[in-house]
Image (cartoon, grey):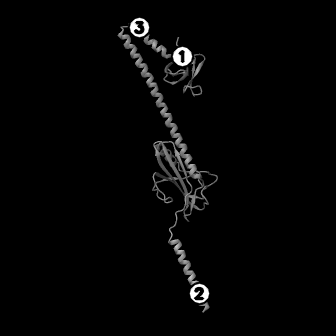
Amino acid sequence: MSHFRFRIAVFLLLLFACSSAHYSFAGIPAKEPPLGPGITKEFSATLPDVLQALHEVLEDQVIHGTWIYDKQPILTGATVANSTPLFEPWKEPGTVFFKVRKDAISPRHFLETADQGTIAVRYIVISISPERVRLHIDAVYVETTHRTVHISDGTVEASEAKEIEDHLHAIQVIEEEDQEAIRRRESANVVRATELRQREDEKALLTATQSSVEDLEQQIKSVQHELERRVKAPGVELKAAPFHSAASIATLPAYTEIIVVIVTPHWYGVELHDGQHGWIHVDNLEPLP
């Protein structure tokens, strides 16, 4: 009889254990695997410029900040993806982009990596204002066989953000150079237009006072003569901007003739006879004889 009671007790304990396990694992929904801290950066830039820089990094086929083999500290073979099951669908504000590298073996800078799997990098772009953009980056590695999730230690996200920042800086430098070139052309056009108006006014004045043809030609030559200078001996460097530390465009020998197109207190913006423009300090020029 005691043996029978012992078997009943064991049976009840097993039944209780099974029901408890069922409640714990079936009754409570499984949590999504946590992501790493990621990285968030804000750029003083327009949304089109940030998107251009991001697309250049997306298309470079590299997962920055990780590698597989120590002799090859770079991981190529990444592709752009419209979506990936390694991240939950994004339902918050912003535009999402992905870069994926399949068949990666124990990539560096993902915690406790093992086996073969897939790396996914997610980029979330949010426009804060016309001149301010926020970028958030997450990276994760998931094993193919066991589906084990390995979060990043932050190196991948930081490296990807640095690449995007470098590309963005290059884009902004080119834009600033283009804008400066436009400003210089506009300034030169204003000077030429001013000179043209001055010459037309002088011609109209001479005509109104019935000046002789010889007087008119002489005054026009005088105006041209005032705009023309020549380089003093022994010569001078033609500068790209009106300061001594600016880059030198060309070396002008003594007595090279130039035309003054921009006048400042200490520097002249000049044009050579071949059409080249630059800046020369006033002390290095003299009137034509």
Q: How many marks?
A: 3
Q: Name the residue under label 2.
A: 7
Q: Name the residue under label 1.
A: 230
Among the two numbered marks 2 and 3 on one chain, the one whose residue lies closer to the N terminus: 2
Q: Which element is circle 3 on?
A: helix
Residue 215's disc number: 3
Q: Residue at x 54, y 44 (%)?
A: 165
Q: Do the residues labelled 2 and 3 touch (CB within 8 Å)?
A: no
Where residue 205 sits: x, y (%)?
A: 38, 12
- Of tags 1 and 2, the one toward the viewer is 2
- Of tags 1 and 3, the one toward the viewer is 3
Q: What residue type is labelled 2?
A: Arg
Quadrant of residue 247 within the rendered picture: top right
Q: Which element is circle 1 on?
A: strand
Among the two numbered marks 1 and 3 on one chain, the one whose residue lies closer to the N terminus: 3
Where residue 74 sits: x, y (%)?
A: 59, 51
Q: Which element is circle 2 on?
A: helix
Marks 2 and 3, Cα distance to the nearest angstrom? 133 Å
Among the two numbered marks 1 and 2 on one chain, the one whose residue lies closer to the N terminus: 2
In front of the other: 284 or 209 = 209
Where residue 230 sits: x, y (%)?
A: 54, 16
Q: Which residue is drawn at 53% across and 43% down?
A: 167
Q: Which amino acid does label 3 sit on?
A: Asp
In front of the other: 27 or 62 = 27
